[in-house]
Image (cartoon, rainbow, N blue to C red):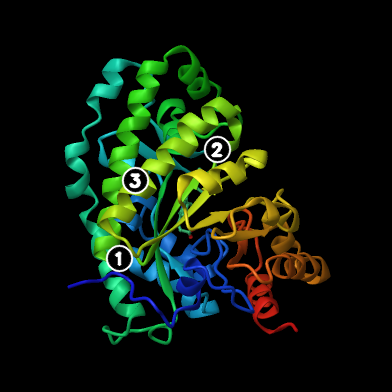
Amino acid sequence: MNNEPQIPSTKRLLRTLNGEALWPPPVWLMRQAGRFLPEFRAERAKADFLTRCMTPDIATELTLQPIRRFGMDGAILFSDILILPWAMGQSLEFVESKGPLLSPIRSEADFKRLDRQRIADVTAPVLETLGRLNKIFNGTDTVGVAKPGSTTLLGFTGAPFTVACYMVEGKGSRDFATVRKMAFSETALFDRLIALLTETTTEYLSAQITAGAEAVMLFDSWAGLLPPSEFRRYVIEPTRQIVASLKARHPRVRIVGFPRLGGIMVPEYAEKTGVDVVALDTGTDLKKILPLLPPSVGVQGNLDPIAVLAGGEAMKREALYVREAGKGRAHVFNLGHGVLPQTPVEHVQELIRTIREEP
Ligand code: CP3
């Protein structure tokens, strides 16, 4: 069966990813399947995070929850960027209030223990989830939660540098000093890690597309920690390679790249990587950056998640600024980072209404 997206499509998000400027813009939110939803918190009690990612019944349900409630234009697979290193055998645990903990990769010996041959077997349930979701969103499964042909299914991975940050540091960090020092002082080893991640990310995303993802997103959450030379070497170049290989294999697939905190490097990223859409973080002025991006590249973003937490007039003002700034361009309305767990559900409801219905 060929699950790949048909173009032209009736899906507003897919059309925008293909370069059309629609009004109002399509909308989905990073971390839309998350702890701010009471129905998500209820499921959470039943299994740990990795089990939830790896059980198709649960991961399918968690992906659908925000679509049922708010009808976003995009559904992002319920999974995590750290599934890939875990699938290569690195230990991974999600500890309440501490975030992810991994056995850190610091030496040649640690690196050599990573086993890319395991990835296909370990990630098979994720691909099964994508296949089920594709059928639900395209009307070939009867448990549809949205009008068939309206919701675009997004797969994702972390980009190599951001995944390497967690692999080397072994946990979240404010500055990821260990990994950035490794890039400078053990460059050969770090280059091999990035090369491994570039290849395995390509394979994993390609498998996601074959399984039913209609577009994919590369999260490079820590890209902006790097100086320009390393930003080119560890963010732009690996992303360019991944995009080129995916497009060679899946010519119609659309790719969103998120070089978070990339600042003045973002236009170069948009120009050189070949991504169809660049996702912008909260601190970027959408109006000011648009003229600096190639006209063929679309944008996604970038409302401050704190504005959604606050709600009311502040949220409305900021949301309408972002919507207006993207007018006339291929723009996917989204946040500049993920929805915060404390966000009231009604604020998200009101945000979606504002984007779709305010004149
Ligand atoms: O709704 C969605 O956006 C889809 C699912 C998704 C998750 N993580 C689920 C998740 C996506 C796209 C991610 C991406 C991700 N994961 C990133 C890139 C985006 C960003 O936030 O910068 C990063 C850096 C990670 C790594 C990660 N996963 C961290 C640092 C944490 C701990 C912080 C936290 O919010 O708990 C996670 C855990 C995680 N990933 C949760 C969810 C729903 C919470 C786990 C739980 O419910 O117990």
Instruction: Compute the Cα span from label 3 to label 2.
Output: 17 Å
Q: Is residue 357 above or below residue 175?
A: below
Which residue appears at 22% of the width and 44% of the height? 119
Crowdedness near tag 1: few (<14), some (14–19) or many (≥20) residues, C-alpha within 10 Å: many
* Residue at the far front in the pictured view: 295
Question: Is the CB of the residue bearing disc 3 within 8 angstroms of ligand 1?
Answer: no
Q: Quadrant of the N terminus?
A: bottom left
Report x, y in % for residue 329. 63, 67
Q: Amino acid at mark 1?
A: Leu
The residue beneath circle 1 is 130
Question: Is the CB of the residue bearing disc 2 within 8 angstroms of ligand 1?
Answer: yes
Name which of mark 1 and mark 3 comes first in the sequence.
3
Instruction: Compute the Cα span from label 1 to label 3.
Output: 15 Å
* Residue at the far top in the pictured view: 185
Question: How many labels, in total?
Answer: 3
The residue beneath circle 2 is 222
Quarter-wise, where is residue 150 in the image? bottom left
Pointers 2 and 1 in contact (C-beta within 8 Å): no
Report x, y in % for residue 106. 38, 19
Q: At numbered mark 2, what does the secondary structure look like: helix, strand or loop?
A: loop
Q: Amino acid at mark 3?
A: Ile
Which residue appears at 25% of the width and 37% of the height? 88
